[in-house]
Image: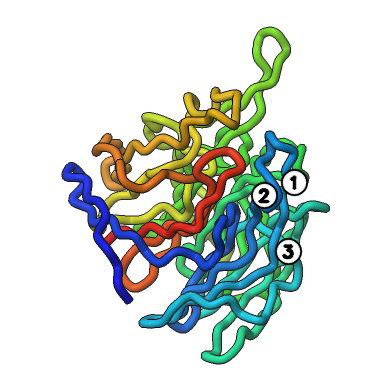
Amino acid sequence: MMMIVEAAVAQTALEWKAFPDLPDERGFAGMYAGVSHGALLCLGGANFPDGYPWEGGVKKWYDGIYLLEQGGKWKKLPQKMEIATGYGVSVSYQDKVILIGGSNAREHLSRVIGYEWDGHALVRHKYPSLPFPLANMSGAVLEDLLIVVGGNVSPTGAGLTKCLMLDLKQVEAGWTEMEAWPGPGRIFPVCATFDGAFYMFSGETTAINSKGNSYRLIHQDGYRLSIQYWAGRRTAHWEKLAAMPRGMSAGGAVLPVVKGDRFLFWGGVDAVTAQHKTPSSHPGITNDLLYYFPHTDSWEFVGRQQRFPARVTLPVVHWQNQWLYISGEIKPGIRTPAITGIN
């Protein structure tokens, strides 16, 4: 498979590559994605097929499944998801791509389902449902623990202060609600795992100003979650981290771990971007690049990515020794089928 080097930012020494686009002219926001037996799977998501939102276009959710095997080309599988959905969490675990929650035009969902590619077709695996419907959250696998944070139970619901956990070695025990972080509830946080800990950053909520008007409050906080064991029980220990230089709501997740010791932050909505009121003239997502260093709890601004448009509401997957930013939204209502890789 040919990959063309499109850009490199000197300050980061990261190699940025154009990856073959998804075979859809518009692309999708809120897709699920993961890896099963070496194959990359991308599923679901939403776009505006009949016009932009400010033109009266209506959002449509999808049930399509796209597959890419090493050395091959993208193909859309004849199989479909059991329901059109997006804006949930997806993780890869033991050659299964697990889809958690999400939303569609009618409701938020509690279902959890796994897909496994056997070389010819997708095999479905059932998992315990979430204890309540949930979308617009974030999550990741820490060893054998599937952790989900934030989100809301309906399109107009407040961002939750919730941390849910499923032991993938004992799925029959179902989901456990753990102690949540010592901060406000939120939708669209971003997360990562590193060195035996789970990390959550940013997200947003709806706040009320001094005149009684609502506005988007983009969080600039971060937290480290350590799972501790005491008398045969798991307990959650949260630690608040150094404040973020800028927020990153709805950014790509999970966050890439690069150079073996830092998280890369690219895209997402910050407080300035959130203040653009006219979608048709929106300038796009900030292209600033930040590093976060878990070992020192510190931040570094490392430049800007000038050649690829930054995005929101997208999965980030580690595949073939690179991190892939898959499709997503580059401006309000405008998707891209582009996939961008970093080594």
Amino acid at pointer 2: Phe
| Residue 24's disc number | none
Residue at 50% from the left image edge and 35% from the top image edge: 269
User: If you read the primary sequence from the N terminus, does the residue marked by circle 1 or circle 2 appear first?
Assistant: 2
| Residue 48's disc number | 2
Q: Estimate the x, y position of residue 234 in percent, counting from the top left.
A: 56, 60
- Badge 3 marks a residue whose secondary structure is loop
Q: Specify the quadrant of the image occupied by residue 343.
A: bottom left
Position of residue 201 in the picture relative to residue 52 (left or right) = left
Position of residue 329 in the picture relative to residue 3 (left or right) = right
Q: Estimate the x, y position of residue 264 in percent, counting from the top left.
A: 34, 48
Q: Which residue is mark 1?
A: 58
- Badge 2 marks a residue whose secondary structure is loop
Q: CA distance from mark 1 to mark 2?
A: 6 Å
Q: CA distance from mark 2 to mark 3?
A: 14 Å
At label 2, counting other C-alpha atoms closer than 10 Å, the crowd grade (few under 14, some 14-19, many 20 or more) is many
Q: Specify the quadrant of the image occupied by residue 194.
A: bottom left
Is residue 4 shown above or below 253?
below
Say whether marks 1 and 2 touch (CB < 8 Å): yes
Q: Which residue is mark 3?
A: 84
